[in-house]
Image (cartoon, rainbow, N blue to C red):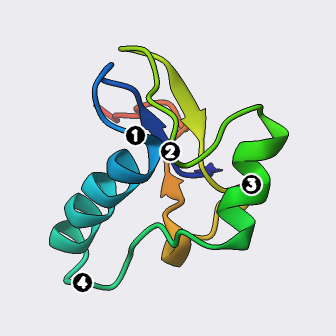
Amino acid sequence: MRRPPLVVGDGVSTIAELIAKQSRHRQAATGRESTIPVDEEAERCLAAAGHSLDEVLAEGTDVIVRCSANLHTGGTIHNVTGACTRR
């Protein structure tokens, strides 16, 4: 299952700073191939959820940054199949 990128507030950093931090982690994990773009789509998605790039999220609060789950724009893949072992 693909999920859109999200960030989790720390009570200190702005959403823009959280996106930059998450993008650095994604770049390190993907050989610099994947980041979360901060563009009109991100701003639109945040605004639809009542947020903005310069807002500081409360600690533990998460917000979806982009509405698409494309891997090259920060989306993630989550395995939803059950563990299957044969004996």
- Taking the spot 74% from the left edge, 54% from the top edge, the residue there is 67
Label whose residue precedes the other's in the sequence (4 or 1) = 1
What is the distance, in whole Å, between disc 2 and disc 4 at their CAs?
Answer: 25 Å
Gap in Å between the C-alphas at discs 4 and 1?
23 Å
The residue under label 3 is 67
CB within 8 Å, label 4 to label 1 = no
Read off the residue under disc 4.
32
Circles 3 and 2, Cβ within 8 Å, touching? The answer is no
Residue ID for mark 2:
54
Residue 57: x and y in percent read 46, 24
Give the foreground label among 3 and 2: 2
| Amino acid type, mark 3 | Cys
Q: Disc 1 marks which residue?
A: 14
For this view, does 64 lie left or right of residue 17?
right
Label 1 near label 2: C-beta < 8 Å?
yes
Residue 35 place in picture, x, y as percent: 39, 72
Looking at the rendered structure, the kind of residue marked 1 is Thr
